[in-house]
Image: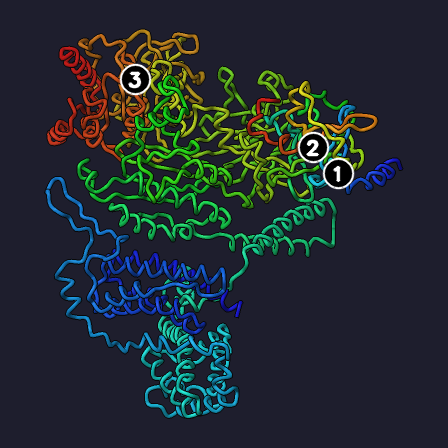
């Protein structure tokens, strides 16, 4: 219900310049992902582990015949692993024409956010976060860092980071 | 008109590509009539179609080159480099115009008179002399040795004279060049059909034609088989199609026009003459009639080839189909257009492939479901579906496969142009052009390949003068070779040019600050050479128009890596370079064996699986360990094992060993020549899997070759046995690995640390004895009752022959009954059994013989696996068994104390390497044994140094004589004592050996002489120093 309200309210400011984001929850933190980059949102999936892969790769999953590499966002961003018994959800994005699934705790809502609320990363932000965050929106109740999916998935140079 | 133009552009583009290649062929082999005919025909078709479509510029250029080609064909002109260059130029012009046409649908503006004039001049035989054009360089090469001018493939004066004399005047009423100017330029707006007078006129004309042909002297017999009505119908149809621009229909009708064999070009000319007469009679005006007749040229091919096909069918009915298929594929003879092919959009094929992949997966899923349902009605239809799917899948796969030759088609032309431009002589050799690969992959490697060949021609191959100065052949060779290897395609690009100069490269690296001097000093030559793959690297001192445009090998490499391939390079300065591109056949559907480890399933490509063995504690097969190394006795061979659980990091070895219920499955896999077992928890069945490449982040994990979706929808990883082998045991495996390892350890003297697999056994005492495992051919247990005595010696019938049996120790005796363990040694035709009391173990340890022995049959004592063991001398036992094998003598005393002297031993026989190594080791030498001269030379290039080299003579690829010459010819090892070792030891051989540069020549089986020779050479060397 409340989400309806939010969307409708913010639709009014679309004209003044705003962006749409999907919010996701990750270990108590809310993050935004640009909505245009999101291909799918999936419930818990069967994920095949890949031994010897970097630890932030949770495995691979089958999305309607496509093989999608699942990224454990908690590990990637330095959170503790999900508690036993809880299952993660997937947000499927694409990077260099390869599909990746970001494993998150839960999906929130779609927000249309005014550009004026956007701010650059504070310089004191954890370097691991600074690397993958585009910037931060000041929402009423909390702050919303925006994930830079391309940077997040540009592993080539950051293999050692995790 | 759009469609027609499109079709024309595609087809003409293809024809031109073919002509490009054929022309280069023709230049090399000017008398090849077939090639010439083919070129002529293609150019002719282009010209004909241009005229038809009203493209005057194209037509006039094509016409002029056709003229020259016609003269070649009729033998009036000689094929020369100059004329070919000009024709190639005209083809380029045609391409240019075509490109313009494609962009704007109109012929671009331009002036071709100069080109046409030159072509005409050649046609008239006036201008075969050195070119007036600056861009066709006629190189003059001064031979430094001879000091005179060389002529690279030019036409001699005498030929010129002859050509000139033979040239007929400017008037050539050549049948192949009818009405070049009349057609097309005017009135193209109104269709020919209307101008001719519509259907009515055509009906009358067709009727007249049909009538006349019946009684026609020359043509009558070709049309007698069908009645007048049918004949009329066919001509009517043909003309309608032609004049309404429906070329496909015209082609079809044209094929049916003549159904009798033997219809010749001449007949066709007569026929169109007749058509023209009839049209004029029907009051069609002259120009239009000409044009109408011209359009018949479009079906000339079809009519003639149809008649020819009949000829072939009559003479060789059985062979015809296959042959015409082949011809079509090769773009060869007239059979080409008979083949039934259509153009299909590539995207459509792509989509089809994806759909089929999905279909396969769904089929598998269905099969999985019905497997669990009993007596299902679905069974039969499903089976049918399954079969159809498989067939469909195969067919679709086939549509995507193309011979790699397609990607190479442009290369001969490119190389040919380069030879002219760079003034070099280069031959392009292409092997394995019919190796097929996925067209998608093919498209992607086209450009990198072209780039690399250009590079080889430009930077690699030296100019003839340089080559002569270096003592090489004047002409360089670039070799392309493609072949399949274990699910990959390997493409090699080799040249025998100057190679990559390490010093030049180093300078450049420093200049560009890609590495510091200190870093460079640490690197091997090969590592430095790999810098050419660094972005923005071009080694040519001067940037030429050919290559070196700032984009270099890094682009090539990234393009290849994009499709999951790798590129490797070896280069020897002064000798040439070799690039090897390895491309996986992704997208392929393969059979995979599904196995389980720790609750996860994995697929192993069936192609590398040899067999499955079940191992349990109490079964016939059980896993044994030799100092933590698990092995399996399999048919008297020891099979090294790896635990999948361990490799994947699920369990440590301790955990594996500590399991209660050991019930394992062993997948026996083969990688190259290396066979090993992968221990898995469980084996399921084989499934067809669609290999999908792994995500880029997982590329580095070499134990996976891809992943796939199984029938039940789950994703599993596909294991790569190559990667497992490499991970499990980097020292095991084929020579590649051996070399790779040698490579890494370059310059470090690791000779002393090399480990040997030793077989431990007991015979006549409690102390273990050892023999290098490599020497043992088989382990047998022989029934005592089958041992016989003959000529006072023990014999046993073994594999259909008598095998002498020798006791390993004088103190031991054969068992009373039961089975006696026997080690079987084989050397060429000699096979002997060595009876021992007990086989103890196999260990891998450093063979470091501490105490030499003078007891016959014993090389010395060594500490093996922590115990003092006697290392036996197999040669001694072989000589006991076979008097002629080698005369046994005590080891001579005059062997120089030679500890610390390093030897390189080259022998292609594993047996000898393994036998000589302990013998030489015990004499105090440090021995490095390699299997071929090539490997030895590589060691040399990598900076190894030895005190002496012992080489076999009879070896594949490079024999000992050649090797010696190579070494003596100013190499780093030129000063080393070189000893030849050969079974051929006649005086002639010895003389030959000395001539080649060997210091001494020793018969292969004469251990003692060899040792003596070694110390002697060492002494000489010492004295000299």
Residue A102 marker: 2
The relative height of residue B802 versus residue A123 in the rendered view (above or below) is below
Quickly name the residue at label 3.
Answer: B927
Residue B514 seen by the camera: yes
Residue B663 marker: none
Direction from residue A75 to residue B942 in the image, left or right: left
Residue nearest the observer in this picture, A6 or B24: A6
Q: Chain of mark 3?
A: B
**Rendering quarter of residue B217:** bottom left
Do badges 2 and 1 share one subunit? yes
Q: Position of residue B210 (x, y in %)?
A: 43, 89
Residue in the picture at 31% in, 7% down: B851
Nearest-to-viewer mark from 2 and 1: 1
Q: Secondary structure at mark 1?
A: strand
Q: Chain of mark 1?
A: A
**Mark 2 crowd level (few <14, some 14–19, many ≥20, 10 Å Cα):** many
Q: Which image quarter is the N terminus of chain A in?
A: top right
Q: Secondary structure at mark 3?
A: strand
Residue nearest the observer in this picture, A10 or B35: A10
Residue in the picture at 73% in, 44% down: B372
Q: Position of residue B117 (x, y in %)?
A: 28, 66
The relative height of residue B335 versus residue B827 in the rendered view (above or below) is below
Quickly name the residue at label 1.
Answer: A18
Mark 2 vs mark 1: which is more N-terminal? Answer: 1
Distance in Å between CA atoms under marks 2 and 1:
24 Å
Q: Position of residue B618 (x, y in %)?
A: 59, 24
């Amino acid at each position: 219900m409340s989400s309806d309200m939010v969307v409708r309210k913010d639709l009014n400011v679309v004209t003044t310049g705003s962006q749409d984001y999907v919010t996701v929850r990750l270990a108590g933190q809310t993050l935004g992902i640009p909505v245009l980059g999101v291909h799918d949102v999936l419930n818990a999936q069967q994920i095949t582990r890949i031994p010897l892969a970097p630890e932030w790769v949770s495995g691979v999953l089958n999305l309607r015949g496509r093989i999608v590499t699942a990224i454990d966002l908690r590990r990637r961003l330095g959170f503790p692993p999900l508690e036993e018994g809880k299952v993660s959800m997937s947000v499927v994005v694409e990077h260099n024409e390869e599909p990746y699934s970001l494993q998150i705790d839960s999906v929130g809502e779609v927000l249309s956010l005014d550009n004026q609320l956007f701010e650059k990363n504070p310089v004191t932000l954890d370097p691991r976060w600074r690397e993958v965050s585009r910037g931060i929106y000041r929402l009423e109740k909390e702050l919303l860092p925006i994930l830079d999916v391309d940077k997040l998935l540009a592993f080539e140079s950051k293999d050692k980071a995790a | 008109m759009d469609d027609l133009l499109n079709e024309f552009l595609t087809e003409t583009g293809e024809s031109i590509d073919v002509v490009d290649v054929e022309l280069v062929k023709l230049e090399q082999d000017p008398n090849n009539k077939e090639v010439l005919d083919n070129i002529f025909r293609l150019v002719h078709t282009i010209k004909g179609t241009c005229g038809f479509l009203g493209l005057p510029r194209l037509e006039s250029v094509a016409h002029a080159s056709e003229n020259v080609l016609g003269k070649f064909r009729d033998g009036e002109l000689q094929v020369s480099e100059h004329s070919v260059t000009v024709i190639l130029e005209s083809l380029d012009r045609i391409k240019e115009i075509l490109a313009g046409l494609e962009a704007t649908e109109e012929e671009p503006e331009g002036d071709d008179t100069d080109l046409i004039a030159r072509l005409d001049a050649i046609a008239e035989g006036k201008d075969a002399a050195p070119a007036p054009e600056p861009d066709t360089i006629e190189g003059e090469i001064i031979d430094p040795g001879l000091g005179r001018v060389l002529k690279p493939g030019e036409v001699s004066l005498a030929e010129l004279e002859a050509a000139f004399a033979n040239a007929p005047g400017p008037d050539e009423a050549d049948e192949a060049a009818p009405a070049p100017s009349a057609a097309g330029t005017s009135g193209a707006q109104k269709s020919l059909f209307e101008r001719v007078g519509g259907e009515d006129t055509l009906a009358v004309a067709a009727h007249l034609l049909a009538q006349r042909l019946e009684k026609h002297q020359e043509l009558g017999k070709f049309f007698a088989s069908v009645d007048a009505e049918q004949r009329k119908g066919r001509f009517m149809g043909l003309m309608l199609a032609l004049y309404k621009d429906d070329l496909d229909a015209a082609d079809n009708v044209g094929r049916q026009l003549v159904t009798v064999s033997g219809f010749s070009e001449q007949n066709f000319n007569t026929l169109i003459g007749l058509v023209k007469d009839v049209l004029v009679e029907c009051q069609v005006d002259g120009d239009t009639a000409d044009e109408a007749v011209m359009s018949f040229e479009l079906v000339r091919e079809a009519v003639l080839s149809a008649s020819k096909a009949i000829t072939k069918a009559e003479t060789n009915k059985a062979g015809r189909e296959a042959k015409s298929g082949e011809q079509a594929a090769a773009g060869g003879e007239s059979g080409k257009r008979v083949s039934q092919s259509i153009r299909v959009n590539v995207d459509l094929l792509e989509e089809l492939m994806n759909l089929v992949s999905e279909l396969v997966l769904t089929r598998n899923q269905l099969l999985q479901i019905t497997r669990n349902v009993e007596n299902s009605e679905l069974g039969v239809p499903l089976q049918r579906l399954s079969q159809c799917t498989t067939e469909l899948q195969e067919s679709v796969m086939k549509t995507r496969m193309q011979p790699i030759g397609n990607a190479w088609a442009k290369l001969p032309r490119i190389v040919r142009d380069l030879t002219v431009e760079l003034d070099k002589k280069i031959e392009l050799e292409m092997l394995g052009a019919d190796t097929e690969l996925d067209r998608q992959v093919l498209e992607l490697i086209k450009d990198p390949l072209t780039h690399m060949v250009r590079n080889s021609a430009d930077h690699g191959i030296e100019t003839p003068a340089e080559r002569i100065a270096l003592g090489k052949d004047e002409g360089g060779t670039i070799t392309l070779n493609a072949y399949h290897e274990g699910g990959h395609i390997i493409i090699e690009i080799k040249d025998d040019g100057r190679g990559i100069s390490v010093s030049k490269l180093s300078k450049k690296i420093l200049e560009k600050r890609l590495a510091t001097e200190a870093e460079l000093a640490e690197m091997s030559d090969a590592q430095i050479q790999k810098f050419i793959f660094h972005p923005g690297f071009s080694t040519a001192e001067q940037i030429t128009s050919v290559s070196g445009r700032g984009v270099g090998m890094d682009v090539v490499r990234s393009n290849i890596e994009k499709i999951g391939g790798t590129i490797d390079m070896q280069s020897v300065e002064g000798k040439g370079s070799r690039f090897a591109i390895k491309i996986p056949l992704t997208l392929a559907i393969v059979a995979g064996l599904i196995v389980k480890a720790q609750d996860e399933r994995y697929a192993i490509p069936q192609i590398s699986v040899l067999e499955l063995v079940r191992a349990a504690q109490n079964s016939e097969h059980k896993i044994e360990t030799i100092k933590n190394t698990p092995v399996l006795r399999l048919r008297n061979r020891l099979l090294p094992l790896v635990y999948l659980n361990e490799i994947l990091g699920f369990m440590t070895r301790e955990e594996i060993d500590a399991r209660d219920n050991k019930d394992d499955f062993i997948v026996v896999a083969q990688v190259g020549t290396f066979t090993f077992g992968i221990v898995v928890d469980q084996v399921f069945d084989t499934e067809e899997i669609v290999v999908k490449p792994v995500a880029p982040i997982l590329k580095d994990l070499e134990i996976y070759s891809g992943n796939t979706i199984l029938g039940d929808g789950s994703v599993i990883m596909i294991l790569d046995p190559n990667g497992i082998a490499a991970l499990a045991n980097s020292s095991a495996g084929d020579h590649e690995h051996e070399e790779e390892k040698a490579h890494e350890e370059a310059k470090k003297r690791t000779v002393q640390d090399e480990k040997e697999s030793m077989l431990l056994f007991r015979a006549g005492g409690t102390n273990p004895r050892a023999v290098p495992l490599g020497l043992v051919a088989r382990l047998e247990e022989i029934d005592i009752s089958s041992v016989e005595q003959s000529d006072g010696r023990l014999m046993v019938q073994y594999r259909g022959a008598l095998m002498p049996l020798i006791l390993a120790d004088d103190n031991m005796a054969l068992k009373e009954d039961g089975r006696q363990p026997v080690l079987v040694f084989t050397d060429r035709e000699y096979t002997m059994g060595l009876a021992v009391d007990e086989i103890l173990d196999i260990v891998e340890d450093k063979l470091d013989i501490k105490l030499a022995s003078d007891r016959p049959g014993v090389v010395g004592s060594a500490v093996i696996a922590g115990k003092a063991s006697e290392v036996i001398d197999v040669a001694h036992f072989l000589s006991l068994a076979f008097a002629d094998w080698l005369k046994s003598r005590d080891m001579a005393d005059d062997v120089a104390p030679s500890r610390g002297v390093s030897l390189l031993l080259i022998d292609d026989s594993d047996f000898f390497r393994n036998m000589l190594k302990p013998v030489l080791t015990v004499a105090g030498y440090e021995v490095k044994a390699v299997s071929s001269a090539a490997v030895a030379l590589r060691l040399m290039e990598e900076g190894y140094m030895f005190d002496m080299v012992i080489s076999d003579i009879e070896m594949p690829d490079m024999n000992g004589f050649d090797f010696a010459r190579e070494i003596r010819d100013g190499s780093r090892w030129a000063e080393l004592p070189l000893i030849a070792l050969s079974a051929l030891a006649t005086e002639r051989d010895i003389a030959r050996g000395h001539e080649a540069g060997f210091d001494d020549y020793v018969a292969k089986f004469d251990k003692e002489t060899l040792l003596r020779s070694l110390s002697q050479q060492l002494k000489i060397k010492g004295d000299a120093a």
